[in-house]
């Protein structure tokens, strides 16, 4: 009896997990993994597609295309899958049976959020492993070819070492993982945003379109702030306006380390840490607002 | 004074459901035109009784139930389950709810659905499995346990809804049209189930348009119209024709009937025979016998 009372009140991780697992099952059975397989195929194909470029260029292109696939996968899931979940439960009245159990609404929301994140995270992990394998293979191949070529041209040992270092810089490394983390965090922010919007939207379509627009604005946030606010406000006003704007619309340029990673530049640890912190803060903020909207929602 | 206060709160805790002065106003869409679905409704369901709520379409029965389950917020008044306010999540730990036209995650199978709802109620492990199997047997869904809910017929969904409502052995069961879309055999089974709940001391709050069945199961009924309770009381008191007695005879000839008539006439005191004739079998019974479903159900 007492244990039942306890499980009835307060926060229960296992209930959130139950919701998340059901969400993953639901999405997986909607054949979303087919989409993952197609994008993975693109990563593999990219490994062998660009033989006309220089050795370094080939590896950059591979990373560029692969990160494109990674981002496409995670953002589409973040927006579309999330937008599907809540309005569908309302429409199908599935929510009646779930919320008539001793399930606090916050647990339901978190379950949905973590379910989507679990699926995105799992997909990204798989694609990351694949990308690393393809990149490693391709790199050793290119390196061997290049060195053989240079040796024929009687290059000095020093020249060989420089070329080898240049190619190795494009290979598998920690900054690649930070790039994948950035993709994941970005997807997390967008997922939380989509969830928040679906809490007051009445349809899937509205949620998808609105989230998509906010994402585009978020990508060009810096531009808008500089171009628009700089002209219309004085210094203090500009600060307030752009601060407000940054709260409402996520600054997705935070996650632009991806470009650096593709270029093969080192990503500073501090920058990665800042990006993680800001990403988590955005997610927490949107989830809190989503919860405030959802507890008041009439079903 | 103090004693009186504790007395009333103890009484309240004894009552399974109390609704006091409930008013629910819906503001519809863009125009924000107010619609009063339930107006100043009060009712009490005592622990252990079967309470039937009847009324024409749109009279506010389902709305009342949703407020009791905390799915809708009352505009005025309050509802309690076993003394706990419906706004508290814990009030839902001992109640099972079957909404009208229930629907579930269509990508889960029947069994997975029950496991999901069981987990939300804090069940786990062997006990959860046992309960789920028991519920599938109870609702005749064993054959459908491995099939996806998306392919369920209306009656199957209804029975799955019932199974889901009972999975955690609640002390109170709230059923919104449990027999809608269920065939006569299944419908009779649900009636028997409600009767067995009463024997086991469970409390039931039920709505239905099948008045004949309601008459068989309910201890008390409330009749609603246009959001207002128009009549409430013990069923026996409401429907009994107090100065009449029914006498059903078998294998009697005309002579015996004539003698009975004579005896009645001779007794004086205003006693008279109101009508004689063969009692009609109900359409329900006829259907059951001719489709032979009733026979199977009985075995
Ligand atoms: N979400 C809502 N928004 C606006 N009006 C609503 C809403 N839900 C119910 N209503 C209105 O409230 C009234 C009562 O509806 P309710 O579903 O409680 O009726 P009911 O007694 O269950 O009817 P039925 O026997 O058909 O199930 C109806 O007129 C309905 O149109
Ligand atoms: Mg109804």
Image: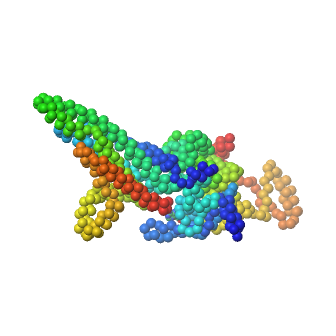
Q: Where residue A82 sits: x, y (%)?
A: 40, 52
Left or right side of A251 for A204: right
Q: Is residue A221 above or below residue B192?
A: below
Please state the total of marks drawn on the protein image. Answer: 0
Where is residue B188? Give x, y as percent. 65, 49
Percent x, y for residue B241? 75, 63
In the image, taking residue B95 as reference, residue B237 lies left or right, namely: right
Q: Please tell me which residue lies in front, A118 or B200.
A: A118
Q: Residue at x 60, y 52 (%)?
A: A5
- Coloring basis for residues: rainbow
Between A95 and B11, the residue placed more toward the observer is B11
Image point (53%, 63%), residue name? B73
Residue B226 visible in the picture: no
- B289 relative position to B248: left or right: left
Q: Is residue A108 visible?
A: yes
| Residue A149: % across, % down | 15, 31
């Amino acid at each position: 009896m007492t244990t039942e009372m306890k499980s009835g009140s307060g926060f229960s991780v296992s209930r959130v997990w139950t919701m998340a697992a059901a969400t993953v099952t639901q999405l997986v059975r909607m054949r979303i993994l087919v989409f993952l397989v197609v994008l993975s195929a693109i990563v593999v194909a990219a490994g062998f597609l660009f033989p006309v470029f220089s050795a370094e260029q080939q590896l950059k292109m591979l990373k560029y295309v692969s990160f494109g696939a990674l981002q496409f996968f995670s953002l589409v899931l973040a927006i579309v899958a999330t937008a599907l979940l809540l309005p569908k439960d309302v429409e199908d009245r599935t929510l009646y049976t779930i919320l008539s159990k001793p399930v606090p609404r916050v647990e339901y929301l978190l379950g949905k959020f973590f379910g989507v994140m679990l699926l995105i995270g799992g997909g990204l992990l798989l694609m990351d492993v694949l990308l690393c394998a393809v990149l490693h293979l391709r790199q050793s191949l290119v390196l061997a070819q290049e060195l053989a070529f240079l040796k024929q041209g009687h290059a000095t040992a020093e020249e060989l070492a420089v070329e080898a270092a240049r190619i190795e810089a494009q290979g598998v490394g920690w900054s690649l993982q930070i790039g994948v983390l950035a993709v994941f965090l970005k997807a997390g922010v967008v997922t939380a945003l989509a969830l928040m919007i679906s809490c007051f939207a009445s349809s899937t379509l509205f949620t998808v379109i609105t989230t998509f627009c906010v994402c585009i604005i978020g990508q060009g946030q810096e531009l808008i702030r500089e171009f628009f606010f700089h002209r219309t406000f004085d210094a203090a006003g500009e600060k307030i306006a752009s601060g407000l704007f940054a709260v409402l619309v996520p600054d997705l340029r935070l996650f632009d380390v991806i470009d650096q990673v593709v270029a093969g530049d080192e990503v500073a640890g501090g920058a990665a840490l800042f990006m993680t912190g800001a990403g988590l803060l955005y997610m927490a903020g949107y989830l809190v607002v989503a919860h405030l909207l959802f507890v008041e929602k009439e079903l | 004074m103090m004693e009186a206060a504790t007395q009333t709160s103890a009484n309240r805790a004894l009552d399974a459901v109390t609704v006091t002065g409930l008013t629910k106003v819906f503001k519809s869409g863009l125009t924000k035109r107010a619609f009063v679905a339930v107006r100043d409704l009060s009712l009490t369901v005592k622990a252990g009784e079967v309470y039937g709520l009847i009324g024409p379409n749109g009279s506010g029965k389902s709305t009342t139930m949703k407020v009791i389950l905390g799915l809708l917020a009352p505009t005025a008044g309050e509802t309690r389950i076993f003394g706990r306010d419906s706004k508290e999540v814990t009030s839902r730990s001992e109640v099972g709810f079957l909404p009208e036209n229930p629907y579930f995650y269509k990508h889960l199978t029947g069994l997975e659905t029950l496991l999901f709802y069981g987990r939300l109620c804090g069940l786990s492990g062997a006990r959860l499995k046992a309960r789920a199997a028991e519920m599938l047997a109870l609702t005749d869904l064993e054959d459908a346990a491995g099939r996806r809910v998306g392919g369920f017929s209306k009656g199957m969904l209804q029975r799955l809804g019932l199974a889901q409502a009972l999975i955690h052995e609640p002390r109170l069961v709230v059923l919104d049209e449990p027999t809608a879309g269920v065939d006569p055999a299944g419908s009779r089974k649900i009636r028997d189930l409600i009767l067995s709940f009463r024997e086991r001391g469970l409390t039931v709050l039920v709505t239905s348009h099948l008045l004949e069945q309601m008459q068989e199961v309910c201890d008390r009924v409330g009749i609603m119209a246009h959001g207002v309770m128009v009549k409430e009381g013990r069923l026996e008191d409401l429907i009994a024709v107090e100065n009449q007695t029914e006498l059903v005879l078998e294998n009697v000839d005309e002579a015996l009937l004539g003698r009975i008539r004579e005896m009645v006439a001779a007794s004086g005191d205003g006693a008279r025979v109101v009508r004689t004739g063969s009692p009609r079998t109900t359409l329900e019974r006829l259907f059951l016998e001719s489709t032979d479903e009733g026979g199977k159900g009985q075995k």
